[in-house]
Every structure is written in structure tokens, then in C-alpha cells.
Amino acid sequence: MSDLVGWVATAIFAVSYFTRNPVTMRWIQAAAAVCWIAYGVLMHATPIIAANLIVASLAVISSFRAVPQKPTAHIE
């Protein structure tokens, strides 16, 4: 079971690299980190849990930062 959780976490993280929107990428990476946390819990691996708590937190927090908008043409 724990191996399956680890592989799912790996797959989710890999998928994040195929997104074009940085906010979407961060949310997918946060989801992967949550899976890694579950894996760490199943494996009783405190370093995996701690590292991915940090990663998930940073991914969520950074997803709320303003993403610069492309300038629009101004017609006068």
C-alpha cells in the first residue's frame, strides 16, 4: 500500500510539469506533497513528512501571489 501511495505522489508531481499555468502547477505540486506526507506517515519517516509539509505550504502560499497579467492593447 505504501509503495502505491509513493508512486501516485510521483505521478502527480510529474504531471505538474505539463501545466502551463503556474498557479495550477503549484496546486498540483501541493497535492503531490500531500500524497508524500501520507507516504511518510505510512513509512514512519519524519523527514519525508516534514519536508513535504514545507513544500505543500509553500506551494499553496505562493499560489496566492499575484500573477502578472499580460498588458492589453489600449485603444484610444
Image (cartoon, grey):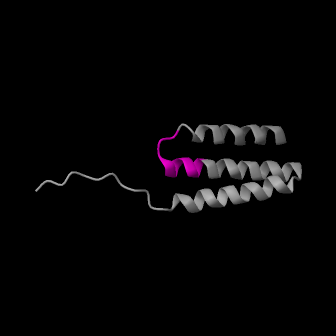
Magenta residues: mostly which secondary structure? helix
Residue plotted at (77% across, 42% down):
5
Report if residue 1 is visible in the image: no
Give the left or right position of residue 73, taking residue 39 as reference. left
Q: Quadrant of the C terminus?
A: bottom left
Q: Nearer the viewer, residue 74 or 9?
A: 74
Q: In this view, does 18 lie to the left or right of 10?
A: left
Q: In this view, does 37 lie to the left or right of 74?
A: right
- The span picked out in magenta is 19-28
> Does residue 8 belong to the magenta stretch?
no
Picture coordinates of residue 14 (x, y %)?
63, 37
Q: Does the magenta stretch include residue 23?
A: yes
Q: Residue at x 36, y 55 (%)?
A: 69
User: Who is closer to the viewer here, 65 or 30?
Assistant: 65
* Residue at the image position 71 percent from the left and 42 percent from the top: 9
Question: What x and y, as percent, mark residue 4?
Answer: 78, 38
Q: Position of residue 19 (x, y in %)?
A: 51, 40
Q: How many labels does the image show?
A: 0
Q: Residue at x 77, y 41 (%)?
A: 6
Is residue 57 shown to the viewer in this render? yes
